């Protein structure tokens, strides 16, 4: 029952919604629940990312090293999704603002599931490519504005 609930929860997250029903069920089966107390750290900036998390209950804050604004994460959010595809360092620190529960999605299981569900893997690849194209266009536009505003 919990796996079916988790699969439904995953289907509402844009990144994971690219997976077919059976793949979502497999991800739900592979996920692990982690309970955090208020003030507990989920991960720190610079930690190796080998999994992603879905916040089920509670609230977390994400903060970077630059002292910028903290981002409040609410239930239903996917945190660290790129760690499902590639090993990378965490770019922020995640702390529980209140008692919280997350589902940990391990990269090794996620990649194994993608191999078993190639159509889902293709949809996810296309989704990531579109997100990268939007990001690249935004960076290009910001760079052009900066260039246009620079005296000289």
Image (cartoon, grey):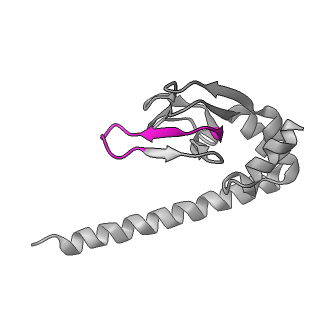
Number of dots carrying numbers = 0
Query: In the rendered view, does 31 fall on the left or right side of 128?
Result: right
Residue at position x 36%, y 46% in the image = 69
In the figure, 115 relative to 105: above or below?
below
> Can residue 86 be seen here?
yes
Give percent across and percent down for residue 100: 61, 32
The quarter of the picture where residue 107 lies is top right
Q: Position of residue 39 (x, y in %)?
A: 49, 26
- On the image, which quarter does residue 49 sit in? top right
Figure quadrant of residue 2: top right
Along the viewing direction, whichever of 82 and 75 lies nearer the viewer: 75
* Image: 21 above or below 142: above
Q: Tell me the quarter of the image containing the C terminus.
A: bottom left
Residue shown at 46% from the left, 40% from the top:
62
Q: Residue at x 73, y 39 (%)?
A: 110
- Viewer-proximal residue, 29 or 114? 29
Q: Is residue 49 left or right of residue 11?
A: left
Is 86 part of what is drawn in magenta?
no
Q: Which quarter shows the N terminus?
A: top right
Name the spot of residue 63 as percent of width and height, x first: 41, 39
* Outermost residue to the left: 152
User: Which residue appears at 30% of the width and 72% of the height?
Assistant: 144
Res. 116 in view? no
125 left or right of 92 in image: right
Residue found at the far bottom of this picture: 148
Residues shaded magenta: 53-70
Task: In this rendered view, identify the residue nearer to me: 99 or 132.
Answer: 99
């Amino acid at each position: 029952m919990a796996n079916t609930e988790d699969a439904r929860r995953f289907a509402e997250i844009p990144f994971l919604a690219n997976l077919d029903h059976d793949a979502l069920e497999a991800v739900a089966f592979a996920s692990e629940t982690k309970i955090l107390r208020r003030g507990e750290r989920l991960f720190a900036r610079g930690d190796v990312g080998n999994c992603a998390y879905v916040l089920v209950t509670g609230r977390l804050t994400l903060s970077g090293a630059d002292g910028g604004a903290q981002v409040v994460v609410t239930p239903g959010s996917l945190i660290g999704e790129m760690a499902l595809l590639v090993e990378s360092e965490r770019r922020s620190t995640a702390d529980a603002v209140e008692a919280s529960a997350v589902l940990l999605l391990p990269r090794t299981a996620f990649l194994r599931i993608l191999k078993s569900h190639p159509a889902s893997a293709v949809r996810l690849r296309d989704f990531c490519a579109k997100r990268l194209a939007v990001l690249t266009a935004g960076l290009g536009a910001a760079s052009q504005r900066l260039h246009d505003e620079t005296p000289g």
